[in-house]
Image (tube, grey):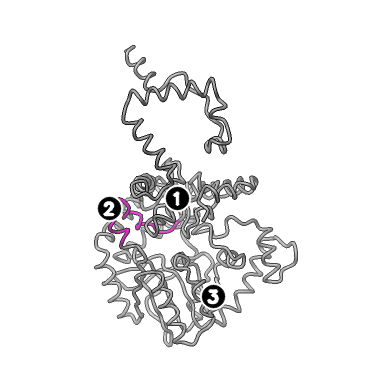
Amino acid sequence: MKDHVALSEEFNIDEPRVNWHDETLWFIRQKRDKAVHGVPEWEWLRETASQVKNNVLSNLSAYLEQFEANALANGIFVHWAADAKEHNEIIHSILRKHYVERMVKSKSMLTEECHLNDYLTENGIEVIDSDLGERIVQLGKERPSHIVLPCIHKKKEEIGDLFHKYLGTAEGESDPQILTEAARQHLRETFLTRKVALTGVNFAVAETGEFVVCTNEGNADMGAHLADVHIASMGIEKIIPERKHLGVFLRLLTRSATGQPITTYSSHFKSPRAGQEMHIVLVDNGRSRQLGREDFRNSLKCIRCGSCMNTCPVYRRSGGHSYHSVISGPIGSILAPNLDMKEFADLPFASTLCGSCSNVCPVKIDIHDQLYKWRQVLVKEGYVSNTKAVSMKTMTWVLSFPALFAFAGRTGRWTMKNLPFLVNNKLNPWYKAREMPVPPKESFREWYTKNRAQK
């Protein structure tokens, strides 16, 4: 499997696309900033949400049991899945019970994480994604490149080609309004004919046994309200203690994600309507293991807003698919190694550690600190290449001796000045993508020692 570096190089072949991708995501980051600056109590909201999540993670089993009891009392069937395999089997069993071979699904990153679509397709079940972005990548036989903007990597002309092939739009049509209307007409028949609908879960309230789904398109509501069976897939970390806490999280979520004051639809599901079945599948899939990792448990606070991706200079210029993980970007880089250290050992290194991700996170996850800590874990556990392991050990040795560090600095500055070809060549991975800096006349230590002596 190609790693982040190799996949990034593929993405960067098309420089105009890279620039467009970068500018588009930065525009969304700017929208987020404007929305945030309009809320004087923003930092209070962030701190409150973070503390609520701390409480949840410290009492997760109790809140889950409370939610289960209340959901059962509301008439919802509650299922528990230890991993992706169990989750998929539970969904399939519900479909078999109702003799269903076609299902409509709204946006759910958890089902992407569990590879539900592939599993159901292999078992003869047709799944239609009803979120516009998800439907586009489904038609393109791709996975989402962003957790909020699934097809952000695609241009409207490419979407037009897909719609011409699969939905019968005019060849060369790329007007977003026309393409959206074509998708709307295409999905209407799906909503009207599917007996089972699946949604994700943004928040689940332990106090009431209800869950909340946030969308801008209304497709989750269409699917759930028209279907005879509503299935909701939920990661166990999505619990919040009381309904009043929704006021905090709903104010944070969409401002962080897209710069909107709130999602167009924040739909509460508490009990099935008369004649309808409602199921919720509570999924662990490595979350308990992450909860037990003291340095990384805070990653379970994530509310999937995607703001860390929109601000990350690496993600913006390498594309979501370069992370070869369902959840990409900074947050994905600290979640993925928990699932498989070997497969995702490269991702924590796909960062400048600039801290912008932590600065914008609405629940104050220390993302860049966790990326740094994952690097240490992966090196110690032997999950990095021999070259990287040797270089890290060499730097550890050099940095342990001030005199050696100073000598290495002087040597490096002399080499860059007098023998630049030893550094500025294609064998230097840094030089492939950057211009090497002008060598300074002296190190900071030398400058500081000299200036301090003058005082």
Circle 3 sits on which residue?
Answer: 127
**Rendered image quadrant of residue 187:** bottom right
Which residues, given as a range, are shown in magenta?
289-305
Circle 1 sits on which residue?
Answer: 347
Mark toward the viewer: 1 or 2:
1
> Could you say where residue 396 lies in the image, as x and y percent from the top left?
34, 35
Q: Please, is residue 111 above or below residue 395 in the view? A: below
Residue sitting nearer the eye, 148 or 387: 387
> Could you say where residue 321 lies in the image, as x and y percent from the top left?
54, 55
Q: Amino acid at mark 3?
A: Val
Q: Amino acid at mark 1?
A: Leu
Q: How would you rate the neighbour count of disc 3 (Cα within 10 Å): few for under 14, some for 14-19, many for 20 or more? A: many
Q: Amino acid at mark 2?
A: Glu
| Secondary element at image label 2 | loop
Calculate the distance from the C-alpha at mark 2 to the C-alpha at mark 3.
38 Å
Q: Please, is residue 112 above or below residue 52 in the view? A: below
